[in-house]
Amino acid sequence: MKRYLIFAAIGPLIGGLLLLFATTYLSGYWAHTNLMEVKKFFVVLFKSLQYSYLFGLLPALMMAAIDEIVCHIRRIGPAVRVVIVGVIGFVATAFMYGNRGADAGVLQFVLYGLVGLVPAMLSSWLAGKLCAPVTAEAKQAQA
């Protein structure tokens, strides 16, 4: 249960930040940056945070379910699990958002892919640190 809470708390927050950054970068917002524009960016981030959680909660919980499944495969270590979950997050968001808008190119594909990669890897790594799977040996030691 902790794993799902970690993914639900971190995924939409980081994903919303990166999605806003990717869209503003691709639109040319960061070409002439000053302190007021950075302030506007964070104002928009906090105003749109509720929508990030609204639309990002279900994908974050799906990534948590994938992480849970991969976690129970004994041959896969924690580092490989984080990479697997990150790659799935990258591919899912790159294909979902990557062909949006008039521009379609490698930069747009990679930026939108990072929107899924970073929160998935961060959440998976944190869940691995906080939610160690209970093995048969651990159950015997507790008894």
Image (cartoon, helix red, strand yellow):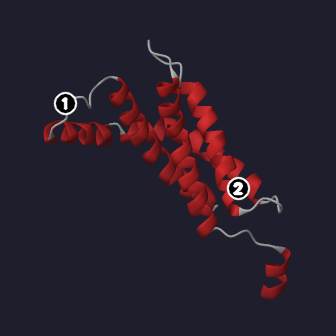
Amino acid carrying mark 2 in the image: Val
Q: Position of residue 128 (x, y in %)?
A: 63, 64
Q: Is residue 1 left or right of residue 47?
A: right
Single out the residue that lies furthest toward the front.
106
Residue located beneath label 1 in the image? 32
Query: Please, is residue 98 above or below residue 43 in the view?
Result: above
Which comes before the other along the chain, label 1 or label 2?
1
Residue 100 visible within the image: yes
Q: Which mark is residue 98?
A: none
Q: Position of residue 114 (x, y in %)?
A: 51, 39
Amino acid carrying mark 1 in the image: His
**Classed neighbour count for the residue bearing mark 1: other residues with Cα under 10 Å, few (<14), some (14–19), many (≥20):** few
Residue 143 visible within the image: no
Quick one: 21 or 54, which is closer to the camera? 21
Q: Is residue 54 left or right of residue 129?
A: left
Q: Marks 1 and 2, how far apart in space? A: 40 Å
* Quadrant in the rendering for residue 46: top left
At horizontal 70% and vertical 55% (from top left) the residue drawn is: 81
Q: Which mark is residue 80?
A: 2
At horizontal 79% and vertical 60% (from top left) the residue drawn is: 72
* Quadrant in the rendering for residue 2: bottom right
Disc 2, SS: helix
Query: Please, is residue 12 above or below residue 141 in the view?
Result: above
Q: Is residue 14 left or right of residue 64?
A: left
At horizontal 64% and vertical 67% (from top left) the residue drawn is: 131
